[in-house]
Amino acid sequence: MEPTTNAAAKLFEQILAQARTDPNIVGFFLGGSRGKGMVTEHSDYDCVMVVTEEVLPEYARRYGHPADPRIEAEVVTLEKFRNHAAWGSSTAWDRYNFAHVTPLVDKTGELAGMLREKGSVPEAERRKFVAGHLDGYINQVYRSLKCFRDGQAAGARLEAADSVRPMLDVVFGMHGRVRPYYKYLEWELRAFPLEKLTMAPEELTEALLKILETGSVRAQRLVLEHVEGMARADGYGAVVDDWGWRLGWMKEFSHKE
């Protein structure tokens, strides 16, 4: 994608000005990198315009296809946006898109709260969510180490790579936050520190790279040790203890690297 231009910025400002003054437009915000404040020269404008039900077809035609390709605009009603990315829905994968996003226009006062809710793990679901992914994470580490034990290098590395996603779900979920898209992971760790994380962000990133590159048993054990400590401190010790002797075996298993 080409870097955004002054022409794109000017068109965006025009659309924003219209959103602020048009009574049929009740909300407006930027998603993507710009919405989170992580702007680069390649960042485009991912706009979401919230309109009244009556004007939806007309405004979708008017604003849905901006003249500049570096501006993307989605036109929705407040009710449609409320239902989008609902927890447990088929679009829940999109929840991180709304994390750390502040509405530029919020005429009903509802949009800011919706954005906060969508960018988080619901309080009522948090413990079940974390416990389930914690068990899944430990299971992936166990599978990886067993493959190393049995001389199955490809399987060991694939299982190790599969452990990263549930591990991050656990670590972020403990804080009530959804796992970031990987593009934002390092930025997220720096910009919004995880107070329960017992590893420095750079240490975690280095360990994850080793796990992804080689399936490093040493790195897997290091991360497992920290996640276990965090889990016990946060009240998930029973999930860890359910692994019994296998947890001890994982901690002791070694492999030449």
Image (tube, rainbow, N blue to C red):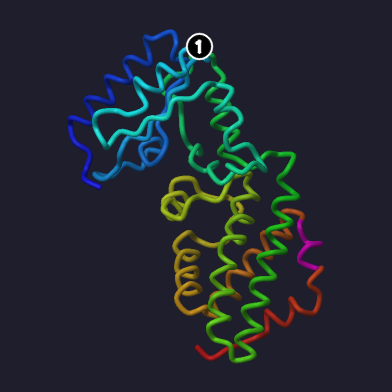
Provide the residue span drawn in magenta: 236-241
> Residue 23 vs residue 252: left or right?
left
- Can you give x and y, in whole percent of width and height, for residue 16 in the image? 33, 20
Q: Residue at x 63, y 44 (%)?
A: 176
Q: What amino acid type should be assigned to the residue bearing mark 1?
A: Glu
Q: In the rendered image of this protein, does residue 177 appear above or below residue 117?
A: below
- Can you give x and y, in whole percent of width and height, for residue 217 in the image? 57, 80
| Quarter where residue 46 is shown | top left
Q: In the rendered image of this protein, does residue 62 appear above or below residue 41?
A: above
- Can you give x and y, in whole percent of width and height, for residue 134 in the image? 69, 61
Residue 240: in magenta span:
yes
Residue at the disc numbered 1: 54
| Quarter where residue 80 is shown | top right
> Residue 49 vs residue 237: left or right?
left
> Residue 132 vs residue 100: left or right?
right
Dot 1 falls on a residue whose secondary structure is helix
Q: In the rendered image of this protein, does residue 94 appear above or below residue 162?
A: above
Given residues 240 and 83, the one toward you in this image is 83
For the image, the number of numbered tags is 1
Residue 142: in magenta span:
no
Q: Residue at x 80, y 68 (%)?
A: 241
Q: In the rendered image of this protein, does residue 164 appear above or below residue 18?
A: below
> Residue 131 vs residue 62: left or right?
right
Mark 1 packing: few (<14 Cα in 10 Å), some, or many (20+)? few
Q: Residue at x 25, y 47 (%)?
A: 1
Q: Residue at x 37, y 30 (%)?
A: 73
- Can you give x and y, in whole percent of width and height, for residue 152 in the image? 58, 87
Secondary structure mainly formed by the magenta segment: helix
